[in-house]
Amino acid sequence: QVQLVESGGGLVQPGGSLRLSCAASGSIFSINVMGWYRQAPGKERELVANIRRRGITNYVNYVDSVKGRFTISRDNAKNTVYLQMNSLKPEDTAVYYCNLLVKVAADSGYLEVWGQGTLVTVSS
């Protein structure tokens, strides 16, 4: 079984920074896509950023509201994805979820796995 453990959330003042981490463990052959979603109370869950790897090239995407402030990265050796969040705003307050598409064997299909969520609160 594949499990994800998230960390790095907390309380920060506007303009501050946080770094979220999501580490995958278990039987993993490869990881195709790593992404971060967030959900605020009463709102739909939205994609914040994701990262894909094709060969040695990484392809990244960001929702418009975080472009220039957030950076997604991955460490393939550690099966870990990060989200560096700078210049945080109150509207960034949400529960952030890690999401992965993984293979458990070379000839298997992709499985979607979700982290438990970590709360980010931006407030003075």
Image (cartoon, rainbow, N blue to C red):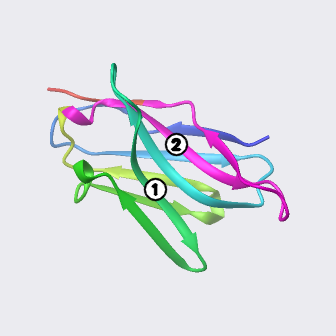
For the C terminus, the image quarter is top left
In this rendered view, identify the residue nearer to me: 92 or 77. 92
Q: State the mark number for residue 76.
A: none
Q: Residue furthest top?
A: 42
In this rendered view, identify the residue nearer to me: 64 or 26. 64
Residue tagged by mark 2?
Answer: 98
Q: Pointer 1 and pointer 2: residues touching (CB < 8 Å)?
A: no
Q: Image height check: is 107 above or below 13?
A: below
Q: Residues within 10 Å of mark 1 (few under 14, many from 20)?
A: many
**Residue 104 locus on image (x, y percent):** 80, 54
Which amino acid, mark 2?
Answer: Cys
Upstream in sequence: badge 1 or badge 2: 1
Q: Residues within 10 Å of mark 2 (few under 14, many from 20)?
A: many
Q: Indicate the secondary structure of the residue bearing disc 2.
A: strand
At x 72%, y 53%, the residue is 110
Q: Image height check: is 30 above or below 49?
A: below
Q: Give the magenta range.
A: 91-118
Q: Quadrant of residue 33?
A: bottom right
At x 15%, y 36%, the residue is 14
At x 34%, y 56%, the residue is 62
Q: Indicate the secondary structure of the residue bearing disc 1.
A: strand
How far, Cα to Cα, is label 1 from label 2? 10 Å
**Residue 123 locus on image (x, y percent):** 19, 27
Which amino acid, mark 1?
Answer: Asn
- Let me know if residue 110 is in the magenta part: yes
- Let me know if residue 25 is in the magenta part: no
Please state if 63 lies on the left or on the right of 112 as rendered. left
For the N terminus, the image quarter is top right
In this rendered view, identify the residue nearer to me: 13 or 27. 27
At x 52%, y 61%, the residue is 74
Q: Image height check: is 19 above or below 71?
A: above
Residue tagged by mark 1?
Answer: 50
